[in-house]
Amino acid sequence: MNYREAYNIEDLRRIAADRLPRIAYDFLERGAEEEVTLAGNRAVFEHIRFQPRTLVDVSKRSQKKTLWGKTFDAPFGVAPTGASGMYCFDADVKIARAARRANLPCVLSTASFVPMERVIQEAGGTLWFQLYMSKDLETAERLVRRALAAGFEALVLTTDIPVAGNREFNRRNQFEIPLRLGPRQILDGLLHPRWLTSVFLRTLLTSGIPRFQNLDVNVGGRIVSTTLTGFRQRREELNWEDLAWLRKLWPKKLLVKGVLTVEDAQLAARYGADGIFVSNHGGRQLDGAPSPIEILPQIADAVGDRLAIMVDSGFRRGTDIVKALALGADMVFVGRATLYGASAGGEEGVLRAVDLLKSEIDRVMALLGCTTVDALGSQYLRFDSSEAVGQTPSLVSQRQAI
Ligand SMILES: Cc1cc2nc3c(=O)[nH]c(=O)nc-3n(C[C@H](O)[C@H](O)[C@H](O)COP(=O)(O)O)c2cc1C
């Protein structure tokens, strides 16, 4: 199958599974430990049903979404994904360029294989920079100033990774950045010749062994901006005072990514954030963390008037996105969906993923009898009364409210 023949995101995932070596596919697809959270991110949507209105004129409908004075063509954007360069050649630029062509916001990861300046120059569009804050504040400040000088419109501080999640498959596969080339990895690559030549060898010939290009480190007092070992200097002491510090440093929009409680959403507002990502990092960090959808209604109630609310983790269908908007999200972000597209067809594959989601959203809106995304609300939803949902307090309270 080719990306043009994909009818949905799952088709793109299958193409990616076929093309990618195991080490890359596992890094993309899998989650932490027992993958309870990973599975929950998908399962939660089954317990939310629609309450469609009928005999509504839906001949003129729009999924455009305005955020902070900019109007996007759809109510979703591209989440930051580190090491994307394993999925197609020059992925960071291609994903950002596809987002610009689709008029959607895109978040570049600190852990990209392409320097942030080149992504801005070659892709353009609405780009936000995701920050993994390093232990050393001088290094962190330099990186933030670099993102500001490069022209990023917002800074997204990821807070749910004080230590790396327990992803045992990575260890089993001996996954490391820069990629380690032992016999196992070489065999894996040889078994996927298309990936080997069009992604790996091409990257190798163009820019050498793939490595992080934005992770600054402090080596004996000297800050080095291109590093092989950046993650060893992760800031485990990251706390709300760091957010206050960033607030002073960063004059543009500031978001906190990794909020899963009402209390933390309120703290983010108090410390001056402009928005949050309600996210469990796509099930890759704390196994047992809830799905963002479960807490979203309470968070939207508590801070929706003060913060822009983004949500990610588990979105694969237009119906999923529409449900989150009806539960109070301003925008949804997708991580794996666009990476499947990148793996299946590079920039055009990412656009295919975006188009599939957009056409699903459009159809769902028509079938729901709702003509604008801002009109979506809990009046369009009903909640399954099964045991599984009964154990989810926030969904229960929503259910009772309806
Ligand atoms: C391969 C991969 C790499 C990721 N890298 C980062 C990253 O560098 N920074 C970050 O904040 N989140 C990262 N994430 C998490 C995503 O930003 C997002 O929270 C998650 O993918 C959403 O779930 P979904 O993949 O089910 O859409 C990564 C996710 C994946 C799948």
Image (tube, rainbow, N blue to C red):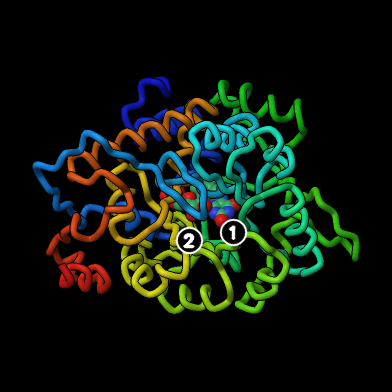
- Spot occupied by residue 262 in the image (x, y as percentages of width and height): 40, 75
* 68 in relation to 114, above or below: below
Task: Name the residue carrying label 2.
Answer: 277
- State the image quarter where residue 282 is shown: bottom left
User: How many other residues sit within 10 Å of disc 1, few (<14), some (14-19) or many (≥20)?
Assistant: many
Mark sitting earlier along the chain (1/2): 1
- Residue at 46 percent across and 70 percent down: it is 306
User: What is the secondary structure assignment of the residue under circle 2?
Assistant: strand
Q: Give coordinates of residue 152: x percent, y percent.
A: 66, 50
Residue 375 lies, with reference to residue 256, above or below; the image says: above
| Left/right of residue 389 with respect to residue 213 in the rendered view | left
Q: Is mark 1 within 8 Å of ligand 1?
A: yes
Point 56% across, 69% down: residue: 273
Looking at the figure, which quarter contains the N terminus? Answer: top left
Q: Return the residue nearer the eye: 281 or 146.
A: 146
Q: Amino acid at mark 1?
A: Val
Find residue 16 and name its label: none
Total marks in image:
2
Q: CA distance from mark 1 to mark 2?
A: 9 Å
The residue under label 1 is 156
Cβ atoms at labels 1 and 2 below 8 Å apart: yes
Identify residue type, mark 2. Answer: Phe
Q: Residue at x 31, y 42 (%)?
A: 318
Q: Nearer the viewer, residue 182 or 18?
A: 18
Disc 2: residue Cβ within 8 A of ligand 1's nearest atom = yes
> Extreme left residue here?
55
Residue pictured at 43% horizontal, 54% vertical: 312
